[in-house]
Image (spheres, rainbow, N blue to C red):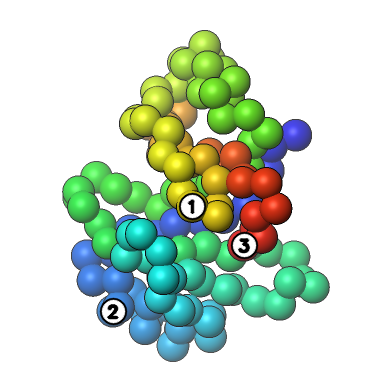
């Protein structure tokens, strides 16, 4: 069963947002050295329930907090999204050493993303 494994927070000013969440909740936040400007968010120890996430530069005002759902086969899952009334928001994007990623919206217009992890990827 696919599970929520990651959240993303869009921010007009990612550094300011990172400081807010670090100062407010004590989250550990560090800039990712990947192909996109992105800040990794660790919300607590891996031994406790919960998920980690990220903060990214907001490109459009309609971007909202999104949950990422781990899937086994992203193409099959995208077909299920469409079949069940959802909307695929973009093309599949390959993220080196992470996996294959795609954004979508549910029947209510809520944004979510799906991630098919790369083989041997260390999940957040």
| Marks 1 and 2 in Cβ contact (< 8 Å) | no
Above or below residue 114? Residue 95 is: below
N-term-proximal mark, 3 vs 1: 1
What residue is shown with label 2?
16
Which x, y percent locates residue 40? 48, 70
N-term-proximal mark, 3 vs 2: 2
The residue under the point 20% across, 48% down is 60
Residue extending farthest to the top is: 83
| Residue 122 placement: quadrant | bottom right
Q: Is residue 87 visible?
A: yes
Which x, y percent locates residue 98? 55, 53
Q: Residues within 10 Å of mark 2 (few under 14, many from 20)?
A: few
Calculate the distance from the C-alpha at mark 1 to the C-alpha at mark 2.
27 Å
The residue under the point 43% across, 33% down is 92
Calculate the distance from the C-alpha at mark 3 to the C-alpha at mark 1.
14 Å
The residue under the point 46% across, 64% down is 54
N-term-proximal mark, 1 vs 2: 2
Above or below residue 107? Residue 16 is: below
What residue is shown with label 3?
124
Judged left or right of residue 104, residue 37 is left
Check disc 3 and report its element: helix, strand or loop: loop
Q: Nearer the viewer, residue 84 or 94?
A: 94
What residue is shown with label 1?
96
Quarter of the image with the C terminus in it? bottom right
Above or below residue 92? Residue 4 is: below
Check disc 2 and report its element: helix, strand or loop: helix
Which x, y percent locates residue 4? 63, 47
Calculate the distance from the C-alpha at mark 3 to the C-alpha at mark 2.
22 Å
């Amino acid at each position: 069963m696919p599970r929520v494994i990651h959240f993303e927070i869009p921010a007009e000013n990612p550094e300011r947002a990172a400081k807010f969440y670090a100062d407010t909740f004590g989250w550990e936040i560090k800039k990712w050295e990947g192909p996109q400007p992105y800040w990794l968010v660790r919300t607590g120890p891996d031994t406790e329930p919960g998920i980690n996430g990220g903060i990214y530069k907001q490109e459009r005002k309609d971007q909202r907090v999104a949950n990422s759902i781990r899937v086994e086969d992203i193409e099959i899952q995208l077909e299920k999204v469409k079949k069940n009334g959802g909307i695929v928001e973009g093309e599949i994007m390959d993220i080196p050493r992470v996996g294959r990623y795609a954004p979508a919206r549910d029947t209510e217009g809520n944004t979510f993303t799906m991630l098919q992890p790369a083989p041997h990827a260390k999940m957040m």
